[in-house]
Amino acid sequence: MGENHVSKDGEGGAIQQVVRYDPTQVIQLSWKPRAFLHKNFLTDAECDHMIELAKDKLEKSMVADNESGKSVASEIRTSSGMFLMKGQDEIISRIEDKIAAWTFLPKENGEAIQVLRYQDGEKYEPHFDYFHDKNNMALGGHRVATVLMYLSDVKKGGETVFPSSIDRTPKDDTWSACGKTGVAVKPRKGDALLFFSLHPSAVPDEASLHTGCPVIEGEKWSATKWIHVAPFEKPRPKNGGCVNDDDKCEEWAAYGECQKNPAYMVGTKEWPGACRKACKLC
């Protein structure tokens, strides 16, 4: 699990808390999609704390409409959930720091943590975490990665499965029929699943299609952190804007990234690039 270390920022500088994680606890599950499991990512106390914060505030889960981008009710997703506030308390802030340390993705690029409860028979049918609408793209661009934290054990069912993956691991009868359809993870309290919805070139990865299998026996609690390619909740210019979103854009452009990685640097029809000025588009 992650550890906290205190260090000084320079000679005589301010004391900072550095959050680290244990890489020996990480298991590579798949390259297509890129998916990794961190055993014991959260402590029991951290899991219980998030459940306690959420349990009296749950509402029926929604999905994003592909056309409008608005949240709508759907039988595709039958769980209940709620969003915590970013940095809601010291424990939540530490968990968010731990996620940033593991993923190497900026903390500000993440959405608020969503806590979910799945009861008997509840599930989330196959879906992508990247967007198909322009409205959601305006807030930080595509979701590049997802960290799914399991807050409880489930007796049977409730697996997270990637049905488009190639799975060569035999599965016994402790897995549900849904969990046997691809690379999958059983919900185990404290474990966390990291997977990427975009290729390194910033193009959506269709192999990241995933399912929350129906709970057969027990109750499933989880917490999700979606992470975007840019700071979340910072609307991007509607006309694309002649700007660089990162201080390193000029350096990246000099190394040829405008040509090597155009989806991120230059942009697409759905999302203006992060380094349009450095790539001399305006």
Image (spheres, rainbow, N blue to C red):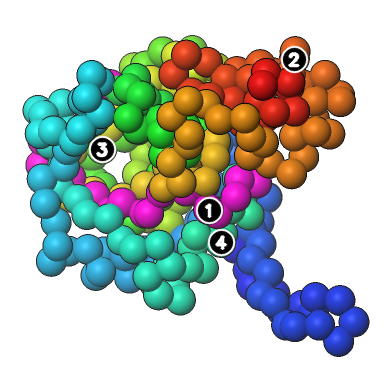
**Distance Cα–Cα, label 2 vs label 4:** 31 Å
Residue ID for mark 2: 260
Q: Which of 127 and 45 is in front in this view?
A: 127
* Drawn side of residue 189 relative to residue 193, left or right: left
Q: In this view, does 278 lie above or below 8?
A: above
* Drawn side of residue 72 relative to residue 238, left or right: left
Q: Which residue is drawn at 64% across and 66% down?
A: 19
Among numbered discs 3 and 2, the one appearing first in the sequence: 3
Read off the magenta span: 104-126
Callout 3 amino acid: Gly
Residue placed farthest to the right in the image? 11
Point out the frontmost of discs 3 and 4. 4
Q: Which of 30 and 7 is in front in this view?
A: 7
**Distance Cα–Cα, label 1 vs label 3:** 30 Å
Residue ID for mark 3: 158
Residue ID for mark 4: 97
In the image, residue 105 lies in the stretch drawn in magenta: yes
Among numbered discs 2 and 4, the one appearing first in the sequence: 4
**Distance Cα–Cα, label 3 vs label 4:** 27 Å
Q: Is residue 7 visible?
A: yes
**Distance Cα–Cα, label 2 vs label 1:** 26 Å
Residue ID for mark 1: 108
**Distance Cα–Cα, label 3 vs label 2:** 40 Å
Callout 1 amino acid: Glu
Report x, y in % for residue 134: 35, 24
